[in-house]
Every structure is written in structure tokens, then in C-alpha cells.
Amino acid sequence: MSTVPGDGGDPHNGRDDQDGQDGQDTDLLAVHQSIAELYAAQGRWQRAYEHLRSALDLARCHRPVPPDPPDHCLLEVERLRREHARAREESLTDVLTATYNRRYLDHRLAELRAEPGGAALAMVDLDLFKDVNDSFGHRIGDQVLRQVVALVQQGLPAGACCARYGGEEFVLVLPGARTGAAVALAERARARIAEHGWGQLSAGLAVTVSIGVAQPRECGPARVTDPHEQLVEADTLLYAAKRAGRNLVAYRECGEIHIVRTVRSGNLTQFHGRDQFVSLDRG
């Protein structure tokens, strides 16, 4: 039986060694490619280019590149992945309130198109927030925004989220919530905010919100299935709550706008109509 010189008599050793070397090359190639992608995601193009060149050399020569040993590369990949995950999270988070931002909301609305049943959307807006800033200062105003977010998020079920839409407006995304459940959740949030001890933050401070709740509608004259159109509907209903006197929740049912009224007993009653709305500014 012929053997490969110097292989100890085993004709397969040379092939096994080569296979092992090829496997290491393949692993290292994947590592360099991963590092290059992560650097590119951060906009660090020079470093990305360096690792792409290393990957290209491996692909051409089938041998490891000396400057970056595998252990070092793996540690670099892990570090970059953590940095990338943190940067992505920060890019989707509102700096002031630490809730999701408009970028995340747009992404979430796009996802809803493919989700069966969609989600209820609630547009939440602080009432007369300009007066808060003018009377108590922007530092207090910022604290109010953060506290409102905390109070709203207290009642959110699993899978739901809150995102800052802009200024003092926030959007609640409530997957799978039917009208009754979504309206009840919004009303509890409204009451929780109205009843909060704002005077502890600054004497004389009072804060309320108005909320418009919109459901996807598959049929009828006012058919709304696109999540962005649904958000416009929630905004329309929010405006109805403002016109009805603020510190209220509005929703639509059977083509009619309904305003939730809470009586002392805690039971929910309804008011609906259009002509009865008094004329008020949006704030």
C-alpha cells in the first residue's frame, strides 16, 4: 500500500489535515465577514474594508490570515454585536421619555399589515401642555412627559407598546384588542393620569390627557385597514375628544363617534353625536 511520505503510514492523514485546515479557513472567513458587516452597520467603512480584504485573501488562498488570530476575531465580533444591538436600541428609543420613538412606531405599523386582526391604536395627547410649560417651566414639562409615559405603560398588556409620536403625543399599539378592551384600557390610563398627585411635582400642577381609539375596519363606508390610515382615524377621534371638553376618550362604532364619560361610581357611560361638540382648540 502506498503512503504519503512522512504521514506515519496512514494514507488519509494528509487529506484529513487539509480538510481540517479548510474548515478553519472557512470559520475564519465567516468571522471576518461578520466583523466587516458590523463595522459597516456603524459606518466605519475603513475597518469594514480591512476585514473584507482579509476575507477575500482567505477565499483566494485558502489559508488563515496572520494579523488576526481566531480568538481575537471572535471577541471582536462579540463586542461589535453588543455595540450594534445597543446602538439599534438607542435609535428606536425616545431620549427624553425612554419609550419607543417615531422610527420604531413606523416599523411596528408596517409589521401590522402582515398580522391577522391587526391592532387597536390609541392616540394620547396631553391637554393644554403649552400651559404647563409656560406656567411651570420646561424642566417640569419634561418630568410630566416622563411620568405620563410611566402611568400609561402601567396598564399595557403583553405585546402592546407605547411610542412617542411627537411633542406631547403618544401612540399605544394594542395587538388583538377589540374595541371594548381597547377603550377600557385607554379610559383607565386617562383616569390614572388625571388622578395622579401632580401637586407633589409642583404646587398647583394638574395634568390630563385626551385619547382617540381606532380599530381596523374591514367593511362599511369608512373602511380602514392600513395601519397608517388607522392612525389618522385615531388622530381624528383624539380631536373629537378635545372638542368634547378634553380629559376624555373617543372611539367610533357603527359610524358614530362615541365619547366615554366616567361617573363617580366608576361605571362607563357613553355620549355620541357630532353637533353637540363645543368648539375648542386642539391643545
Image: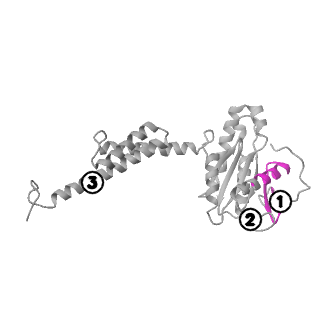
x then y, percent, for residue 228 = 70, 55
Residue carrying label 3: 22
Residue situated in front as seen by the camera: 177 or 36: 36
- Specify the label residue 257 is tagged with: 1
Query: In the image, which residues are magenta?
Result: 234-263
Residue shown at 43% from the left, 36% from the top: 46
Q: Are marks 2 and 1 in contact (CB under 8 Å)?
A: no
Give above or below for 115 relative to 169. Answer: below
x then y, percent, for residue 73 = 34, 43
Is residue 259 magenta-colored? yes
Residue shown at 72% from the left, 47% from the top: 193
Type of amino acid at the residue the image marks with label 3: Asp
Please name which of the two marks, 3 or 2, marks the residue nearer to the observer: 3
- Specify the label residue 67 is tagged with: none
Q: Are marks 3 and 2 in contact (CB under 8 Å)?
A: no
User: CA gap, disc 3 to disc 2?
Assistant: 58 Å
Type of amino acid at the residue the image marks with label 2: Arg
